[in-house]
Image (tube, rainbow, N blue to C red):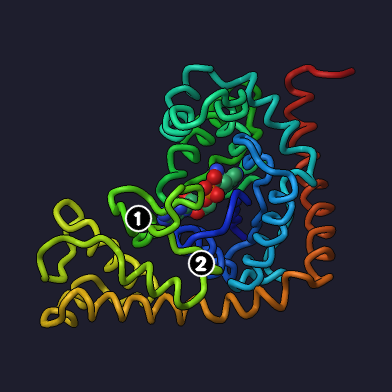
């Protein structure tokens, strides 16, 4: 059975972009693949975090996974820092990765320009991500478009290591959804919707109240025309809403344009708001039931144990090939 793996950072409230780009893909694919999903808490500390907030966000993310339909019977679910082999493997791979290759990563260039006095972990971040993927011989990595470059780096690292030390790693492939791979900010629709955005008006958080979701969508930036037409270049705002509608219903962009050809932006926005509210309602309800449940701890204990056993083997294999220890 082919294997899929993905992780999300517990760095704030999850967004509709995270849900559409990553979680929902995992929920769909869990029926056909052996599935691993984790909380990338080690990645989260590459920028400053408040410890008690971070701990809360980690648990919250697990509850969101489960509430969104990630089935613990079909998935191995764990917290990255509860499996020591991720950081261990990362060190080995860091020593095999050219410095220049990391400096060229788009996300590093972007984040390093926004944060002052950032730690070295921000640069080595994609190597830790490569470790996450390569430790488990994942075939596919479901993510949004923003992580594609990092998965490509993981492929490069794996190919380089295999060439030098023999067949150690499987070469993973990114799995980017055909639609919804980049949900954009509602206020500034040329940039991606991000959980770390300073302006929450443009970001739909999965746990936002119905009223807040409606206000944000009704207030979304659109152009001065009235035609509901998909045109990313000239009409990024309305195109983003069409994208959300299409991702959540599966109705094609052409059909959406046809359906709303005589409607104005207000009507369309109202329908998008209803749709998002309806989609998130059961997730929010389930989340409240789960957040304090003991079930979460049981799942995480099992996940840490199971993945540590698998990861240990891969780590020891490379460590041995590299001549470390006795
Ligand atoms: P993170 O936490 O930034 O995002 C989690 C997932 O959500 C996707 N995503 C989006 N998709 C569509 N539209 C958006 N606006 C949007 N924003 C985010 C991301 O592409 C991602 O799939 N480095 C990763 C976490 C990670 C990981 C891994 C992922 C660590 N190790 C191994 C896969 C495999 C990250 O920061 O994702």
User: Badges 1 and 2: C-beta atoms under 8 Å apart?
Assistant: no
Left or right: residue 162 versus residue 91 is left
x and y, in percent, of residue 261 in the image: 12, 79
Q: For residue 246, what is the image quadrant? A: bottom left
Q: Is residue 252 above or below residue 274?
A: above
Estimate the x, y position of residue 306 in percent, counting from the top left: 81, 54
Q: Which residue is mark 2?
A: 24
Which residue does the image show at 45% across and 35% down from the upper left?
107
Q: Quadrant of the C terminus?
A: top right
Name the foreground residue: 59 vs 176. 59
Which residue is found at the position 11% from the left and 70% from the top?
A: 226
Q: Residue at x 70, y 25 (%)?
A: 91
Classify 295 as above or below 12: below
In the image, which disc is placed on residue 184?
A: 1
- How many marks are shown on the rendered structure? 2
Q: Is residue 319 left or right of residue 93?
A: right
> SS of the residue at dot 1?
loop
The Cα–Cα distance between marks 1 and 2, rounded to whole angstroms, is 17 Å
Quick one: label 1, few (<14), some, or many (20+) residues within 10 Å? many
Please indicate, yes or no, whether residue 198 appears anywhere in the rendered image: yes
Q: Is 220 rendered above or below residue 95?
A: below
Of the numbered discs 1 and 2, the one sitting upstream in the chain is: 2
Q: Classify the position of the N terminus by image quarter.
A: bottom right
Taking the spot 65% from the left edge, 78% from the top edge, the residue there is 286
The one of 269 and 77 positioned closer to us in this rendering: 269
In this view, 111 is above or below 202: above
Q: Is residue 143 visible?
A: no
Of badges 1 and 2, nearer the viewer stands 1
- For ligand 1, tell me if the residue under mark 1 lies within 8 Å: yes
Taking depth in this image into account, of 163 and 142 the one nearest to the observer is: 142
| Residue occupying the far right of the picture | 326
């Amino acid at each position: 059975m082919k294997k899929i793996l993905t992780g999300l950072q517990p760095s704030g409230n999850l967004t509709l972009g995270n849900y559409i780009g990553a979680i929902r893909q995992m929920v769909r694919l869990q029926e056909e693949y052996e599935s691993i999903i984790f909380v990338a808490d080690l990645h989260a500390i590459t920028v400053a975090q408040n410890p008690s907030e971070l701990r809360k966000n980690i648990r919250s993310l697990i509850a969101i996974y489960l509430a969104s339909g990630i089935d613990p019977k079909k998935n191995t679910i764990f917290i990255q820092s509860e499996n020591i082999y991720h950081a261990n493997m990362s060190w080995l791979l860091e020593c095999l990765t050219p410095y220049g290759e990391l400096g060229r990563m788009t996300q590093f260039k972007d984040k390093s320009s926004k944060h002052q006095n950032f730690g070295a972990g921000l640069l080595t971040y994609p190597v830790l991500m490569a470790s996450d993927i390569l430790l488990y011989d994942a075939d596919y990595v479901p993510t949004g478009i923003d992580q594609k470059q990092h998965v490509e780096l993981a492929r490069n690292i794996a190919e380089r290591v295999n060439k030098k030390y023999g067949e150690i790693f499987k070469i993973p492939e990114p799995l980017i959804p055909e639609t919804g791979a980049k949900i954009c900010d509602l206020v500034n629709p040329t940039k991606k919707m991000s959980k770390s955005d300073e302006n929450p008006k443009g970001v739909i958080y999965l746990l936002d109240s119905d009223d807040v979701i409606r206000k944000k969508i009704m207030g979304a930036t659109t152009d001065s025309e009235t035609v509901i037409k998909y045109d990313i270049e000239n009409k990024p705002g309305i195109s983003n809403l069409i994208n959300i509608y299409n991702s959540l219903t599966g109705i094609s962009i052409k059909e959406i344009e046809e359906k709303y050809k005589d409607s104005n932006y207000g009507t369309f926005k109202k329908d998008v708001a209803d749709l998002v509210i309806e989609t998130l309602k059961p997730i929010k309800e389930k989340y409240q039931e789960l957040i304090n449940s003991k079930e979460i701890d049981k799942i995480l204990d099992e996940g840490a144990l199971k993945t540590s056993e698998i990861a240990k083997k891969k780590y020891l294999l490379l460590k041995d090939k590299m001549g470390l220890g006795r």
